[in-house]
Amino acid sequence: MASIEERTQEDGATTFRVKVRLKGHPVQSASFASKTKAKQWATQTEAAIREGRYFQTVEAKRHTLAEAIERYERDNLPSLKSAAHRRLHYAWWKDRLGGHTLADITPAAINDALRELAAERQLGPQSVAHYRQALSSVLTQAANTWQWIEQSPMHRVPKPALPRGRVRYLSDDERTRLLTACKESANDDLYLAVLLALTTGGRQAETMGASWSQIDLSRATLQLEETKNGSRRALHLAAPVLEMLKERAKVRRIDTGLLFPSRVNPKQPVDLRQPWEKSLQAAGVEGFHWHDLRHTFASMAAMNGASLPELAALLGHKTMAMVQRYAHLSPGHTAALAERVAAKMMGGGEI
């Protein structure tokens, strides 16, 4: 219930003090110059308290975005693999909107900030999406865990339209030339590293950061415990790779557990950028990145009849969306299914 008390100030002005008392909630009060405004506030406040909105709104006005980001960085960021990149994103958000209270972090304010970000730094949709996701993680935590806001405003901030996924894979001739160049490289790690990526479809961080403890030579597997999507996955080691690993195991370094340790710091993976670029140039392969070794593996699997679910399992994707880009490379697989369906409809054998 709300009560309104009329008061006369020392200067003769009249004010109306409102008190809202609801069982189980602290008393809320405010003063207004007119009784009409006092009644409006009382009605709105009572409704907000009954619906559970009022105290979250008050809480949102007590904390700035900078406070929320700093708490998230302290509590959540250390466990993320992308912590270094996220800190760069959060530094920008704190500079742009850090002084605003969470109540003022509206969808419009976020949209304006993202547009300015893209223009100022000339960023593409994918990069802007990373900044958006970084802020979304903080606001989701503020809503669901800390209860500083009623709900995250990110629900009304559209994601940037991303371009279709790039697919560049090696032709048979390119593959032969590149492997020959890598084999002739002065770097002892390059050929095995490229062959491992090319025959497993593993991500660069998964293969280059691999340790001997993950490799089972008897079962010909490289076990991935922490993948990008959070699930375990085993990569099969093809015969040529397995033989090379067996030979390498005989002379492996004892000061590190990494499969490809750096000569400078054995606790860090080796940097293959220069020998990789030289081999690409020597092989005459243009417009090709290390990640495209994974695309080459997936494309070859698709062209040899792998279904989309099989591709998803090989590549470690949880959904079909990421492997749809290879669907057009396996027409024989869908053609065979279409023939069986047609045969069934025409009275032939079973589908």
Image: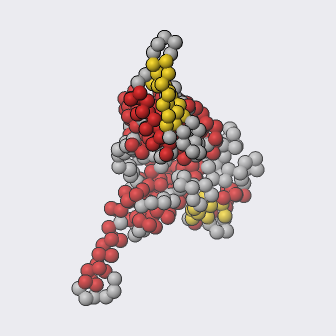
Residue 60 visible (yes or no):
no
Q: Tell me which corner region of the image, top left, top right, bottom left or bottom right, holds residue 273.
A: top right
Residue 344 image offset from top left, x and y in percent: 28, 84
> Going 25% across and 88% down the picture, which residue do you hit?
347
Q: How many marks?
A: 0
Closest to the observer, 74 or 176: 74
Residue drawn at 51 percent across, 59 percent down: 316
Between residue 7 and residue 300, name the one nearer to us. 7
Q: Does residue 348 appear in this view? A: yes
| Rendered position, 318 above or below 56 | below
Q: Is residue 184 left or right of residue 128?
A: right
Q: Is residue 233 left or right of residue 267?
A: left
Q: Residue 99 in the image: x percent, y percent?
A: 51, 26
* Residue 215, placed above or below residue 68: below
Quadrant for the C terminus in the image: bottom left
- In this rendering, the answer to whether 93 lies above or below 260 is above
Measured from the top left, where is residue 14 in percent x and y?
A: 45, 19
Judged from this view, the residue extending furthest toward the right is 254
Residue visible at 33% across and 71% down? 334
Q: Residue furthest top?
A: 11
Which is nearer the eye, 321 or 313? 321
Q: Position of residue 214 (x, y in %)?
A: 66, 58
The residue shown at (57%, 45%) is: 23
Quadrant of res 159: top left
